[in-house]
Amino acid sequence: MVTRKRLLDLFVNMLEINSPSKDERRLADFVRPALEALGYEVYEDDAGRKIGGNTGNLLAFKQGASKTGAQILFSAHMDTVQPTSGLRAVTTDDGIIKTDGSTILGSDDKAGVAAIIEALRVVEEESIPYRSVQVIFDVAEEIGLLGAKAVPREAIRADLAYVFDMEKPVASIVVAGPSHDNIRAKFTGKAAHAGIRPEAGVSAVVAASKAIANMKLGRVDFETTANVGVIKGGTAHNIVPEEAVVSAEARSRSEEKLAAQVRHMAEAFHDAAAEVGTSVDIEIEREYYSYRWGKDDPVVQLGITAGQAVGIEPELIEANGGSDANIYNEIGVPAVLVGVGCEAVHSPQEQIAIDDLVKCAEFAVELVRRSVAIG
């Protein structure tokens, strides 16, 4: 069974290791021996070199004794958002782990890493049969899923994948995730002295502003969102700005709706440029692709069965956030995102209940135990 103190000690030790995106070296060196001690073949790929970081993804694999069943992949990311330097984990009397408020906690996604390692320990201690288990602890998830994107399809030896990287409720299953497009619009106008000859200038900032004002943004509908996140332009308050750059995004679980939203935003950029008299160059880049699974699909059905085994009726969620699950699905590995139990991630109020962390590890154990009945 899951050992509460062992899991808690592992989690707290990891929390106190600073591991920002592209600087996961210390955490990778901490968790690798834990996998090797369980008999896993572990290697580090070259993702660090590809993305300009100091650490690659850790990929671990162990063949089980069963000749039947599904080959399972567990995934979690090692990096965290900032700040975590100087983090002090605090455990409250009611069993909540948080910080002193000066940093985030980093349970996103060290709770996932800890739960997976503890589950694998239980699987070996109880000699639970399985066909095979693969683990990927990846890097630079927080800045664009870069680690997962660097994993080649041939490196994955699994039929079903479970990405432990979502907030409460524990063992919830994200059965659908969105596609995501990034949009960059660069307006070019004409500079002029803003006080002496403003009529000689053509303001790129005005064009950008008009475009944004005419866009449908925020929650466009129940499965589509759009946002303008960054606006940069101008050089001084007394110069009509010659250049403005707008960085935006759109997401949807419907490819048709995403295409329509991106087209709408591009048209708003073009219309504003024509109205003001600037030029505009627009770049559109796909960040990741959507996925959708049904209740009866094996990757979901196994999750439901495992949740029920630990006393949970898993909530099936359609989300509008991207994750490593999007990447695994894109390369042909059926994958879902699952809840680990953390709350208020990426903020000083981030926390996780010890009971939820334990339940998450128990859920992972049951995924392995029940995988032999799949296929």
Image (tube, grey):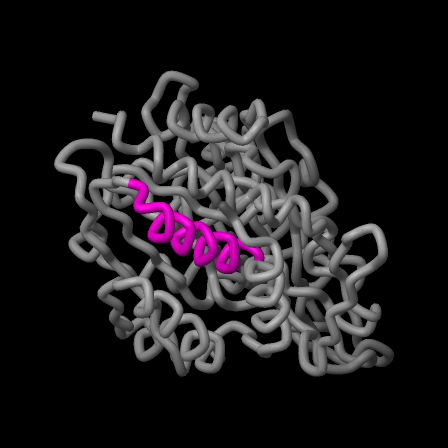
In the image, which residues are magenta? 111-128
Residue drawn at point x = 55 percent, y = 53 percent: 3
Magenta span has 53? no
Q: Position of residue 80 (x, y in %)?
A: 58, 67
The answer to whether 233 is drawn above or below residue 98 in the figure is below
Q: Is residue 121 magenta?
A: yes
Residue under the image location 31 percent in, 79 percent down: 49
Residue 45 place in picture, x, y as percent: 26, 71
Q: Quadrant of the C terminus?
A: top left
Image quarter for residue 82? bottom right
Q: Residue 344, how many percent across, how many down?
A: 74, 51
Relative to 225, is 62 above or below? Answer: below
Residue nearest the observer in this picture, 17 or 22 = 17
Identify the image quadrant of residue 374: top left
Which image quarter: residue 76? Answer: bottom left
Q: Nearer the viewer, residue 155 or 189?
A: 155
Q: In screen coordinates, is 231 left or right of 256?
A: right
Q: Seen from this angle, which residue lies furthest left?
A: 67
